[in-house]
Image (cartoon, rainbow, N blue to C red):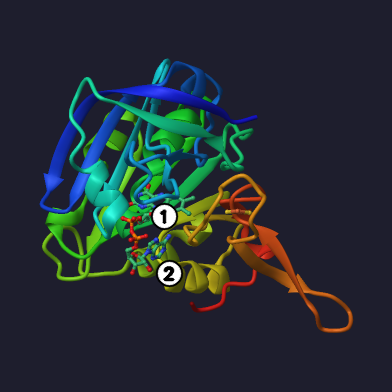
Amino acid sequence: MWKQENAEVLEVKRLLDDVFWIKFKAARIAQDAAPGQFVHVLCSDHYSPFLRRPFSINRLDKDELSVLFKVVGEGTRLLSRVTPGQTLNLLGPAGRGFPVNVSGAHVLLVAGGMGVAPMPALAHRLLAQGNRVTAIIGARNARYVFEAEYMAQCGAEVLVCTDDGSAGPRLTATSMYRELRDKGDVAYACGPLAMLQEMKQCAATPLWISLETRIGCGTGLCLGCAQPSGYTEDGQVVYRKVCIDGPVFHASEVVLLED
Ligand SMILES: Cc1cc2nc3c(=O)[nH]c(=O)nc-3n(C[C@H](O)[C@H](O)[C@H](O)COP(=O)(O)OP(=O)(O)OC[C@H]3O[C@@H](n4cnc5c(N)ncnc54)[C@H](O)[C@@H]3O)c2cc1C
Ligand code: FES
């Protein structure tokens, strides 16, 4: 069950002009959190923007958790301006995370762009449970490769590829996944919709995906996050709620339509 907590900002790192990393002390949320879950953040204390903004739990360590995000609008712009010592109201741990009840498996993690955000906590947990982890990180160029070092330090084998070849081979994360898909026992992915669609089509093992569809209330009440999950016998679309049924789904549980 999620909790509401006034979390202290412990550290803020500006990784690029538009990409930030924030570490919070949020004991009540962090102690219950699982990789792939998210925190719903009140980005300001003056109700503008009114709605909270969702961010994947990026790293987890006892009483602390972090988020990694790109500035795209008002909420993330406000979030990028917080300073250590400030408190922000978080709701979490929200949603259903990645299944982590695996051990002795070879797990492929596939991240595209900011989809790398939930992977460090996931890699850390899977490695602690005796799995072998190969993390594929696809980014537009070398500057946009995040968390490779952290995951390597945790013990993951990290493979980087970029659109322009400035780090690793000039490949997309999906092309690299195609080359390796038979070698893993299970794959977990987060990234752009087109990447998840392509992975779903070519997956050779069970595939779990984290969706970053826009969400509203984050608590299952507003239906703002409805995601098609299949069809009834008479052709009606059946929906799942990304905020409580996800954001992580088995690929077969969702129909991935373009926005
Ligand atoms: C479960 C979940 C986890 C997420 N985790 C992360 C994360 O770890 N790091 C991160 O950088 N982002 C993450 N996101 C996306 C993040 O929540 C949005 O970027 C953020 O809410 C934008 O808020 P804003 O007020 O800055 O932008 P807004 O002013 O709300 O929007 C600015 C622009 O961005 C577009 N936009 C906003 N949200 C989304 C979205 N979800 N998908 C596609 N386009 C969008 C809008 O259409 C608009 O064009 C996650 C989303 C979900 C649902
Ligand atoms: S965001 Fe309101 S029901 Fe999911």
Residue at the spot 64% in from the left edge and 33% down from the top edge: 101
Is mark 2 in CB contact (under 8 Å) with mark 1?
yes
How far, Cα to Cα, is label 2 from label 1? Answer: 10 Å
> Label 2: how many residues lie within 10 Å, few (<14), some (14-19) or many (20+)?
some
- Amino acid type shown at disc 1: Val
Q: Residue 145: x percent and y percent?
A: 21, 52
Please give left or right for residue 255 compared with residue 237 in the image.
left
Residue at the spot 37% in from the left edge and 23% down from the top edge: 7
Whichever of labels 2 and 1 marks the residue nearer the N terminus, that label is 1
Instruction: Name the residue carrying label 1.
Output: 110
Q: Does the rendering let one see residue 206? A: no
Report helix, strand or loop for mark 2.
Answer: helix
Observer-nearest of 62 and 53: 53
Please give left or right for residue 137 compared with residue 106 in the image.
left
Q: Depth-wise, is mark 2 or mark 1 nearer the camera?
A: 2
Instruction: Name the residue carrying label 2.
Output: 195
Q: Does the rendering let one see residue 101? A: yes
Observer-nearest of 21 and 248: 21
Report helix, strand or loop for mark 1.
Answer: strand
Observer-nearest of 78 and 166: 78
Please give left or right for residue 61 compared with residue 201 in the image.
left
Which residue appears farthest toward the right when viewing the image?
A: 233
